[in-house]
Image (tube, grey):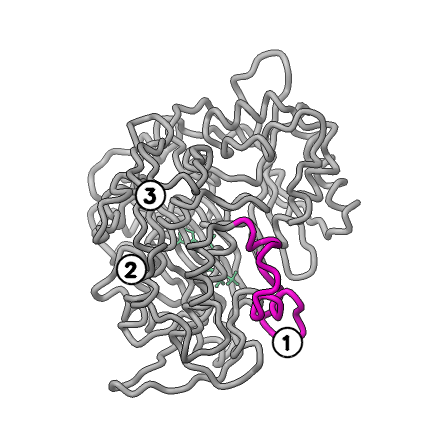
């Protein structure tokens, strides 16, 4: 067992802090445009974890942007909201700014969305409501986010902080959605006076038409628009258009209601279409406000109660509307509560099975984090918490770890991707603006044959592009893919229980290849 788990539970005194670090970096959670996000845990209280956004202090302009992100996060964290990532503090040294944030241990909402399929309507509604609640709080604080997309909507499995809605639904549902990444956010109102914004920013497929057109725009409506696109992505597993502009045929068709019998619209219920009509309108004056979204019949529709019995997958208790398809499978993806056997990295570092049901808390002593000498940056317990997140972008192969490593590298190169070999038998695979980190884990407890879980994590760039890259590599490796191993991964909650992605029998060319 690692040092982290065997340490005593006593809080460290100030004198020992000067000798030993209290916090240690244990994993890389993501890489952003200006730096990386690391998972940091308290050595003696490993359930105390934070995300540390490490940003390079390269020039005055960049420093100004980081300072702005810090001030915005601070403003939002003073009172705080369950659906907005909280900031704990920031410190700066000669080379970096370190932003300490509440850790979301459930990964990105993006990873719950099955390409071309989406997620069940009641679960989409559950996340959508939380997104709107969080956004309402952000706007009330005079801030507009400007980059709402599933990659910036993080999840935490802690039950303590589940928000209470004016509805009785889902009160046991484990995922809490947290709006994160305030790198594009800005003040849209000052002393009660709203100002028009002009910076073109955000992520193109989620951006409102007025932003795409380069016009001056009002803040809140552009976030509402992005929420509408997120809703389409959740319910259909695809984006409606690449860009909301006159150059996009699907977009123009939507505006004139000419393509409602086509994808993605034909996948959604008529009530969903009604709310989308109110949100995805190019007429900003007519676009639904948050208040109107909250009053919409689909938003308030009662799908029935979801239960989360201990150690069992989620099941929907009752369904009120037969027009809506049931889908317990996706609900299962949210709960990774089965006791798991060990997984080892190729170097033999063990995972600690007994910690998998832990829920994380934030440090009570922020000073421990904010002082430089208290964080061990060596990452020598890399990936300790990896198994906490159930991810779609994994598969099992029946080749030895070393051979698997070479095969993944070759498959990636053959796909035209740039491959960099990294420490710990990891691969950083890049194509254009998008990078993914690939890690191999030997599955320890399966006798007779080698089994390796190949894990792909988006480290930079667009989530859809990442999934395309993942599928490309997976399809090239189809001869090595082990379907019984995939079932095993699904049973233990490492991947969602979804036959299309996990249990394909013959090859990797599942119906998701056109994502
Ligand atoms: N608080 C957190 N808890 C868990 N994971 C996090 C947290 N903050 C960020 N991450 C992970 O790190 C990734 C990058 O973080 P973030 O989006 O804040 O950085 P960024 O530099 O703005 O990235 P991008 O350039 O992709 O917009 C996220 O997509 C997420 O996977």
Image quadrant in which the N terminus is located: top left
Q: List x then y, in percent, for residue 370.
A: 30, 60
Distance between mark 2 and mark 3 Cα atoms = 36 Å
Q: Earlier in the sequence, mark 3 or mark 1?
A: 1
Distance between mark 3 and mark 1 Cα atoms = 37 Å
**Residue 245 forms part of the magenta stretch:** yes
Instruction: Count up the numbered dots.
Output: 3
Crowd around label 2: few <14 · some 14–19 · many ≥20 (10 Å): many
Residue 210 sits above or below residue 119 on the image: below
Q: Which residues are magenta?
A: 239-267
Residue at 55 percent across and 16 percent down: it is: 446
Quarter of the image for residue 285 reads bottom left
In the orientation shown, which residue stands out farthest toward the top? Answer: 448
Q: List x then y, in percent, for residue 100.
A: 35, 59
Q: List x then y, in percent, for residue 164.
A: 22, 50
Disc 1 designates what residue? 246
Residue at 44 percent across and 52 percent down: it is: 38
Q: Is residue 449 visible?
A: yes
Quarter of the image for residue 507 reads top right
Disc 2 designates what residue? 88
Comparing labels 1 and 2, the label whose residue is closer to the camera:
1
Disc 3 designates what residue? 303
- The local secondary structure at tag 2 comes to strand
Residue at 32 percent across and 59 percent down: it is: 84
Is 235 left or right of 85, judged from the image as shown?
right
C-beta proximity under 8 Å, tags 1 and 2: no
Note whether ligand 1 is within 8 Å of mark 3.
no
| Dominant secondary structure, magenta | loop
Crowd around label 1: few <14 · some 14–19 · many ≥20 (10 Å): few
Residue 428 sits above or below residue 74 on the image: above
Q: Nearer the viewer, residue 198 or 15?
A: 198
């Amino acid at each position: 067992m690692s040092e982290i788990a065997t340490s005593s539970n006593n809080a460290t005194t100030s004198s020992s802090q000067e000798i030993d670090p209290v916090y240690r970096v244990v994993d890389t959670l993501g890489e952003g445009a200006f730096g990386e996000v690391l998972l940091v845990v308290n050595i003696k209280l490993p359930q105390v974890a934070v995300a540390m956004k490490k940003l390079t202090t390269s020039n005055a302009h960049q420093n100004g942007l980081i300072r702005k992100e810090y001030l915005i996060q601070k403003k939002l964290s003073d009172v705080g909201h369950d659906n907005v990532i909280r900031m704990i503090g920031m410190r700066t040294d000669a080379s970096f700014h370190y932003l300490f944030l509440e850790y979301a241990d459930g990964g990105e909402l993006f990873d719950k969305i099955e390409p071309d399929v989406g997620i069940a309507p009641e679960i989409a509604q559950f996340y959508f409501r939380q997104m709107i609640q969080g956004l309402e709080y952000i706007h009330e604080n005079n801030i507009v986010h400007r980059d709402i997309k599933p990659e910036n909507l993080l999840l935490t499995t802690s039950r303590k902080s589940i928000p209470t809605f004016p509805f009785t639904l889902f009160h046991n549902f484990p995922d809490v959605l947290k709006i994160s990444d305030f790198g594009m956010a800005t003040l849209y109102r000052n002393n009660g006076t709203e100002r028009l914004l002009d910076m073109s920013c955000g992520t193109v497929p989620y951006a409102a038409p007025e932003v795409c057109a380069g016009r001056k725009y009002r803040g809140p409506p552009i976030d509402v628009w992005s929420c509408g696109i997120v809703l389409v992505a959740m319910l259909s597993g695809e984006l409606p258009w690449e860009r909301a502009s006159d150059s996009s045929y699907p977009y123009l068709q939507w505006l004139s209601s000419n393509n409602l019998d086509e994808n993605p619209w034909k996948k959604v219920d008529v009530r969903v279409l009604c709310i989308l009509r109110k949100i995805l309108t190019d007429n900003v004056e007519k676009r639904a406000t948050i208040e109107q979204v909250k009053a919409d019949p689909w938003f308030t529709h009662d799908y029935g109660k979801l239960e989360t019995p201990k150690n069992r997958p989620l099941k929907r208790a009752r369904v009120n509307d037969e027009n809506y398809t049931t889908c317990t499978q996706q609900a299962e993806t949210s709960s990774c509560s089965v006791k798991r056997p060990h997984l080892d990295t190729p170097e033999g570092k063990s995972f600690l099975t007994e910690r998998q049901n832990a829920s994380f808390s934030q440090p009570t002593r922020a000073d421990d984090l904010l002082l430089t000498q208290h964080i061990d940056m060596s990452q020598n317990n890399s990936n300790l918490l990896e198994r906490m997140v159930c991810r779609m972008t994994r598969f099992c192969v029946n080749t030895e770890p070393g051979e698997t490593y070479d095969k993944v590298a070759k498959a990636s190169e053959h796909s035209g991707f740039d491959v960099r070999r990294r420490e710990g038998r990891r691969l950083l695979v890049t194509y254009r603006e998008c990078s993914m980190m690939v890690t191999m884990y030997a599955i320890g407890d399966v006798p007779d044959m080698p089994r390796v879980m190949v894990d792909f994590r988006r480290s930079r760039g667009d989530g859809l592009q990442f999934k395309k890259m993942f599928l490309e590599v997976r399809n090239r490796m189809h001869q090595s893919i082990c379907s019984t191993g995939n079932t095993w991964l699904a049973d233990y909650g490492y991947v969602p229980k979804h036959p299309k992605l996990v249990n394909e029998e013959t090859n990797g060319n599942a119906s998701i290849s056109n994502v």
